[in-house]
Amino acid sequence: MNIRISLLIASAIAAVSTLAQADALADRKEAFKAIKEPFKVARGVAEGKVAYDKAAFEKTAAELVEAGKKPWALFPAGSGGGKSEARPEVWSKPAEFKAAADKFQDATLKLADSAKAGELDKIKLAIAAVGETCKACHKDFKKD
């Protein structure tokens, strides 16, 4: 009887763990979607596909800063696996992953500062810098 109870408890723990992992994956996907939208607008401004309006762009940059704070905490130890697009290096190299996240956040803050200054040439450079941090992180920490 004790073995059955132990197996039942182990099965329940595994089921809860699987559900928690699925929630973590869904939360991460939503957090990265929240980054994608304002960055898409910013990139459109840089490429001349979206008309530049200082006030609107300041709002977009602020949205990017806020969205950029969220996903990194959604990668706790042991949350890999499943249908995640994250490479195992996220968890095996947490210091490097944090450094990549910090670079992204620094780049978004510089973009927000450029947006406040309203100098389009500097804004375009800052948008490119944000994009480079995305590419670098994807290269090292996201599956193809």
Image (cartoon, rainbow, N blue to C red):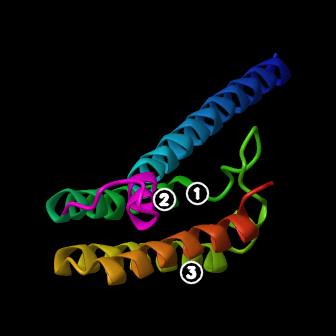
**In the picture, which quadrant includes the N terminus?**
top right
Q: Is residue 47 magenta?
A: yes
Find the distance from the CA under tag 3 to the CA under tag 2. 13 Å
Task: Identify the residue under disc 2.
Answer: 73
Task: Identify the residue under disc 1.
Answer: 76
Give the image location of residue 8, x and y in percent.
Answer: 75, 20
Above or below residue 42? Residue 105 is below
Residue at the outermost left position: 55
Q: Residue at x 18, y 75 (%)?
A: 116
Q: Is residue 136 magenta?
A: no
Along the viewing direction, whichever of 114 and 137 lies nearer the viewer: 114
The range drawn in magenta is 40-53
Task: Identify the residue under disc 3.
Answer: 99
Q: Residue at x 58, y 57 (%)?
A: 76
Above or below residue 57? Residue 6 is above
Query: As shown in the figure, which amino acid type bears the numbered disc 3?
Result: Ala
Label 2 crowd (10 A; few <14 / some 14-19 / many >=20): few
Circle 1 or circle 3, nearest the eye: 3
Q: Are marks 1 and 3 in contact (CB under 8 Å)?
A: no
Give the image location of residue 137, x and y in percent.
Answer: 64, 69
Mark found first going from the N terminus, 1 or 3:
1
- Along the horizontal axis of the image, is 9 left or right of 71? right
